[in-house]
Amino acid sequence: MELKTKIHAEDGKQEIFITREFDLPVELLFKAYTEPELFEQWMGSKVVKMENKQHGGYRFETLNPQGEVVFSANGTIHEIVPDQKITRTFQMENTPFPVQMEFLEFEKLTDTTSKITIQSIYKSVDFRDQHLKMPFAQGINWAHNRLQELFK
């Protein structure tokens, strides 16, 4: 089955591009990324902190059925423009991966459709390639599918 969320990684570069079109107005897509209650529903992670402002921070955790933290990530928001963009750092805790820089762009396609483009920049090509070997593409596609279903 083809993944609706596309990952583009050019050989020899330290970045990846993640794109996905949604049958959602851009305002709803942006809210899904910035409102803790919505984010938790589609991402499947608990929001510990989400300060949607310049110099604000965020942190979320994914728990196993026993309630133990199996994944956590945090970052700092550098710029946020409602319904347009978020510029932030992203760091997976307790992993060998250093912090990444992320540029999230929200685009209105029509009144009822939108697109997100996420550019993630890694410290090195090697770190990027290691990340791509993880089940990352399937995970983000699964989460984006849940996001789309949330608003049906």
Image: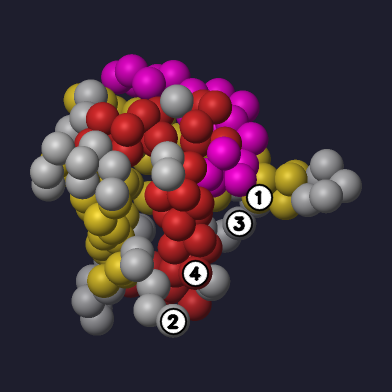
Res 95 label: 3
Give the camera-side residue of 19 and 118: 19
Query: Which residue was labeled with disc 1?
Result: 71
Name the residue at 32% across, 38% down: 29
Residue type at the position of mark 4? Gln
User: Which is nearer the N-term, disc 1 or disc 4?
Assistant: 1
Determine if the magenta segment contains residue 54. Answer: yes
User: Which is nearer the N-term, disc 2 or disc 4?
Assistant: 2
Q: How crowded is mark 1: few (under 14 residues within 10 Å), some or many (20 or more)?
A: some
- Of marks 1 and 4, the one in the foreground: 4
Q: Is residue 138 at least partly visible in the picture?
A: yes
Residue range highlighted in magenta: 41-59
Residue type at the position of mark 2? Met
Res 91 label: none
Mark 1 vs mark 4, CA separation in Å: 16 Å
Mark 2 vs mark 4, CA separation in Å: 11 Å
Instruction: Name the spot of residue 125 as percent of width and height, x first.
Output: 33, 71
Query: Which residue was labeled with disc 4?
Result: 138
Q: Is residue 14 above or below residue 81?
A: below
Q: Which colour assignment does the render follow?
A: secondary structure
Q: Is residue 56 above or below residue 85?
A: above
Q: How crowded is mark 3: few (under 14 residues within 10 Å), some or many (20 or more)?
A: few
Determine if the magenta segment contains residue 49. Answer: yes
Mark 2 vs mark 3, CA separation in Å: 30 Å
Instruction: Name the spot of residue 45 as percent of width and height, x first.
Output: 61, 42
Q: How crowded is mark 4: few (under 14 residues within 10 Å), some or many (20 or more)?
A: few
User: Which is nearer the N-term, disc 2 or disc 3?
Assistant: 2
Query: Which residue was labeled with disc 2?
Result: 1
User: Which is nearer the N-term, disc 3 or disc 4?
Assistant: 3
Query: Is 90 on the left-hand or right-hand side of 29?
Result: right
Q: Is residue 79 at least partly visible in the picture?
A: no
